Amino acid sequence: MGKATGKGVSHTWRSTSAGEARAERGQEGWQVRETDEPQAIERHKAGIKQGQGPGRAGRRWIPAPAVAITALSLIGLALAPTAGAAAQAQAGPQEAKTWSAARTAATSAINPSNAGLTPSLQFARNMGRGWNLGNSFDAVDTNWSSPDRGEQAWGNPEVTPDLLKAVKAKGYTSIRIPMTVYRRYRDLGSTNKDGYRFLIDQAWLNRYRQVVDQAKGLGMHVLVNIHHDSWIWLKQWNGQTGAKEEVMFSDFWKQLARTFADEPDSVAFETINEPQFNTWDYPSGQEKLDRLNTEARTIIRSVPGNEHRMIVMPTPSTTPSDEYTRHLAALIKGFKDPYVAATVHYYSEWLYSANLGITGFDERIGTDNQGRPTTARTSAAATFKTIQENLTSQGIGTVIGEYGLLGYDTGNDVLQEGEEVKYYEYMNQLARQGGVGLMLWDNGSMISRQAPYGWKNARIGSELQAAMNASSSYATGADTIYLDSKAQSGLAIPLTLNGNTFVGIAGLSSGSDYVYDPSSQTVNLTPAYLNRIQSVPDAPRYGQLADLTLRFSAGADWHEYVVRNGQASSSSAWGKRNGITIPMDYAGNAVRRVSARQGGRSVGPNSSWWSYLQAGSAFSCDRSAGTFTLTGNFFGDPTVSDGTVDVTVDFFNGPSIVIPLTLSSGSVQAAVSYPIGW
């Protein structure tokens, strides 16, 4: 996919014409309503613009509207009013107990049938854990004045056999190879002898097939996919038979069906990526998609060699909502074709996935329509439950063709790394339990596209590989312990074992450095150990004192960091409305979330319904450089006017600080910060 901020819509949501998320207040409180801006989603997840190379650090993203994400409405999410949002992260013992019960119930609700598998269900299981070759064959420069650089259009290098071998060696059993046909075809003006008016460039098609064959030769299952064409030109289809867009779609599938007809059935077809349309009234977007899915199937089945080839069909925008998955199931069952499967995408809750102040995988986002707390975890469970009830229980194999987190490579401090690990662990756990294919979206920022093709983030990669076959254990709380003074007592680290057993901490001695209590599944660091690491001669004044590697009987290791911190502060600075960078002494701490108020009300993007700014979009942090930046996206929001704006920065430990800003015409003046309560 290659895309932008959140997505998804459920049976209680309806798209609007505006490209931003809205909140509507009803009797149950604030209800998130999503808008449908899939093109922006495509741009955001693509991440790499022409001339920009991939990479986690220093990555630039195309600004995109805020689009609320998938399962919020699946579980009837009701957000608290913005004035009370800051209190949501604080839970008393009883509320924590309720959240724990909701989390357990969400997981236990997924019980796949043990009945005999249909070819479609078997296909999904065979896909297993998969990987997307993103931002390569789907990359395209839509500016026709620039030459088409093909698979290198968005900065990734040419795909090599060694890259595919490295992906296979990491444990992936399937690969999705998105392809954009736009700019890689000719309009002949009339139908040629082979029945095509729109002819795919043969050299492009040959190169694409070469990579498909290389992956197939490694024993991988391959998913052939028409990709960004969905938002570049297909969305303009008015629903009329014979319209240019419909003929193009038909002609492309005629050629693809013939090109791959001699391939084994391990090569499957996906009709279209994240289908979307400019108008959804008449014919409805759903009706248009039904007709395209049906047409693609008819074309594919008419070509000898494709009788048993799996055809994978998406929901609108590939959203896993109740309404859309039920409709797709009915369509597929109507074909009476056992070789048709379903696909959806999942990028978690937008507030967590892109980090709008929700940093924890188990942090409360709101409450559902039964008053239960909702989190990114419960939303993931709800999505898999919908897939099980509407698709897999009906014998329809399902592949989550893309999953990931939207803030992953927006910047180093956008997502909390330990909470990322928990998301990947849980998604893989649910996929294993449900027999669902699960394919990681990678635009070049996960696995390096350069030899030796390693993980760009070793910790994330270790979890992704371990999670393919086993559950991992982790600290129930955060992955960082902050110390601001000499330890008078030990520190407890409660563990979530997920069926494993605790083995020990690498390099530390049980009894003197830590004590493990198996009854409570808690590691207790001793005060002697904590004071020793603070007093060694080369211990930093502020910053990381230790990286503890906790080991378990199965799954990935867990890293728990011990950090010494003090009071963060920022200095005065001057900038403009296109952005201001402010010197900041983080004093060993990390930013948890940021909010802004002017005249007693929240300001900035999404401030009409949410209190916190989006990390990596409205602001960014660079702890190594000692800077904090408010971007043009923040100042460009119409709610931010000339005058005084107070920006509050919350940290994971220690007092928050307020940065007073004075805006006048195009200039911005930041005064010295002060701690809250000062």
Image (tube, rainbow, N blue to C red):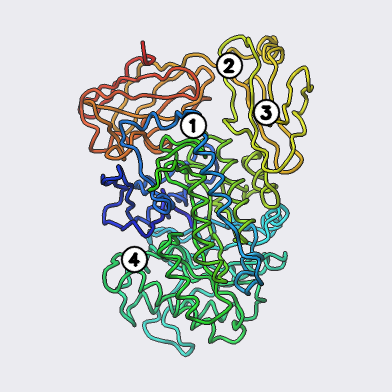
> Which residue corresponds to the image point at 56% horizontal and 86% vertical from the top-left?
303
| Dot 1: element | helix
What's the amino acid at mark 2? Leu
| Mark before the other along the chain sequence, 1 or 4 | 1
Query: What's the CA distance linking mark 2 and mark 4?
Result: 53 Å
What's the amino acid at mark 4? Phe
Question: Label 1, on which residue?
Answer: 94
Query: What's the CA distance linking mark 3 and mark 2?
Result: 19 Å
Q: Is any part of residue 124 visible from this angle?
A: yes
| Mark before the other along the chain sequence, 3 or 1 | 1
Rate crowding at label 4 as few (under 14), some (14 to 19) or many (20 or more) other CA atoms within 10 Å. Answer: many
Which dot, 3 or 2, sits closer to the camera?
3
Give residue 315's position: percent from left, percent from top: 44, 66
Question: Label 2, on which residue?
Answer: 483
Residue 260, picture quadrant: bottom right
Left or right: residue 57 compared with residue 69? right
Query: What's the CA distance linking mark 1 and mark 4?
Result: 46 Å
Give residue 247's position: percent from left, percent from top: 39, 79
Give residue 151's position: percent from left, percent from top: 54, 59
Query: What's the CA distance linking mark 4 and mark 3?
Result: 52 Å
Q: Are discs 2 and 4 less than 8 Å apart at CB? A: no
| Mark before the other along the chain sequence, 2 or 4 | 4
Left or right: residue 12 compared with residue 624? left
